[in-house]
Amino acid sequence: MDLQIAATAARQGLKLPTRNGSDFTGLESALAVVDLPDQP
């Protein structure tokens, strides 16, 4: 599911905000991953 979300963001030229940036390691050349801080 994560790769489908990443593919959609990349295709649309969007940044991908996530709380689990490590799931998208290696995709930095295809899209911008924005690692959000954890909620308390």
Image (tube, helix red, strand yellow):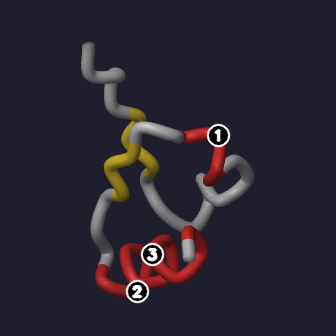
Give the alpha-carbon distance from disc 2 to disc 1, as whole Å. 20 Å
Residue 37 percent coordinates (x, y): 33, 22
Label 3 vs 2, first from the N-terminus? 3
Q: Amino acid at mark 2?
A: Arg
Determine crowd level at label 2: few under 14, some 14-19, many 20+ residues with C-alpha closer than 10 A.
few
- Nearest the camera: 6 or 2? 2
Check disc 2 and report its element: helix, strand or loop.
helix
Residue 17 in the image: above or below residue 4: above
Q: Position of residue 13 (x, y in %)?
A: 32, 75
Q: Is residue 23 above or below residue 4?
A: above
* Spatial separation of the CA atoms under disc 3 and disc 2: 10 Å
Does label 3 or label 1 sit earlier along the sequence?
3
Task: Residue 2: name its quadrant.
Answer: bottom right
- Sequence-wise first label, 2 or 1: 2
Instruction: Tell me what residue is drawn at x 37 percent, y 74 percent.
Output: 9
Query: Label 1 belongs to which residue?
Result: 22
Q: Residue furthest right?
A: 26
* Quadrant of the snapshot with the N terminus: bottom right
For residue 5, which numbered disc appears in the image? 3
The relative height of residue 22 versus residue 36 in the rendered view (above or below) is below
Q: Quadrant of the C terminus?
A: top left
Q: Is residue 4 left or right of residue 32?
A: right
Between 20 and 25, the residue placed more toward the observer is 20
Tag 1: residue type?
Ser
The answer to whether the residue labelled 3 contacts the one labelled 1, judged by CB atoms less than 8 Å apart, is no
Q: Residue at x 73, y 53 (%)?
A: 26
Residue 29 is drawn in which quadrant?
bottom right
The residue positioned farthest toward the front in the image shown: 40
Determine crowd level at label 1: few under 14, some 14-19, many 20+ residues with C-alpha closer than 10 A: few
> Which residue is labeled 2 in the image?
11
- Describe the element under mark 1 as helix, strand or loop: helix
Q: Nearer the viewer, mark 3 or mark 2?
A: 3
